[in-house]
Amino acid sequence: MINLLAGRTQTPQAPNSSYHIMSILSSNNKIEFYKFLNGDISVEDLENFIYSQPDLEQQLDSEAYLDLIEFNFKDKYNKVKLPEFIKTSIIEEGQFETWKLQRALNAFLTQPDKIDLNLNRIYHLYCGVYQGNRKRRYAYKFLGNLGLNYLYWTDEGYLKTFYGENWKTEYEKFSNDFGFYHKQLKNFASEILSAIDSKEIEILNDGTYRISNVLRNKLETDEIYQLQHPNEKYSS
């Protein structure tokens, strides 16, 4: 570390993000940055990872690497600039958003007992990130059949409003039907994951995405799948 910093007499207050990403990060290293951007690990966890990972120097642009290891992780004003620096200088934002999307869909497929929580996350991905100009970035209309079928009636706030102190009992009743709902929706998640793998859906760095015409015509219609409820199983 001392050799790397030799001759650099001034520590920058915040990293310089004016250069292009030229990193070839390994998948494992990318995931650590993804976890930080997603709020899964703290600034302190990321700092420990950076200083314990000797291969980062070979995988990052030299200027980005030096700015990163000189970054003042203890300064609260610098901390708020760190996510933007990572997205402009270390990883591609489109790759991070792809990881978030795949993670949410995989969680939905593998955790039918948490379908309510996972559909709520997918709903927020469907809506995207609101911008000050009223436009939204990373809003995925192709998630409509999943996101717009979130189980609002299992939400804690909703249950407390209608059932008061008995809300947990009602939640347990509803949770018995999670498998029934999951069976109806899982094919949508599988199809979207497969499309991401085959590049029929590609998340871009500018907050938009590309999707094949076939999938767009199939998934991005105004007719959202109507979720069937258990009491409708045998209705004509």
Image (spheres, rainbow, N blue to C red):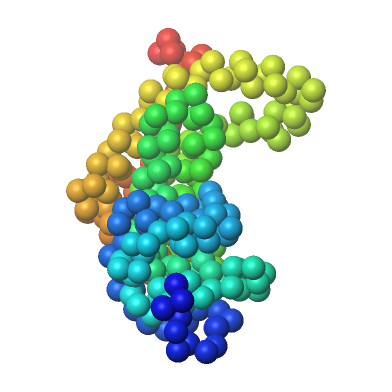
Coordinates of residue 36 in the picture (x, y in percent): 50, 56
Visible residue check, residue 208: no
Q: Residue at x 34, y 59 (%)?
A: 95
The relative height of residue 224 versus residue 65 in the rendered view (above or below) is: above
Q: Which quarter of the rendering shows the C terminus?
A: top left
Can see residue 119? yes
| Vertical arrangement, residue 98 with respect to residue 164, above or below | below
- Horizontal placement of 152 versus 141: left or right? right
| Nearest the eye: 136 or 207 | 207
Relative to the observer, which residue lies in front, 88 or 25? 25
* Position above or below: 217 against 159: below
Residue lying furthest right = 165
Total marks shown come to 0
Above or below 67: residue 23? above
- Residue found at x 46% / y 62%: 50
- In this view, the residue in front, 125 or 55, is 55
Q: Residue at x 51, y 29 (%)?
A: 114
Tell me residue 153's x, y (percent): 61, 29
- Residue at the outermost top position: 234
* Quarter of the N terminus within the rendering: bottom left
Please identify the quarter of the rendering in which residue 30 is found: bottom left
- Residue 160: horizontal and vertical position, in percent? 75, 29
Residue 159 image offset from top left, x and y in percent: 70, 28
Residue at figure coordinates x 25%, y 41% from the top left:
194
Q: Is residue 141 left or right of residue 154?
A: left
Query: Which of 130/17 is in front?
Result: 17
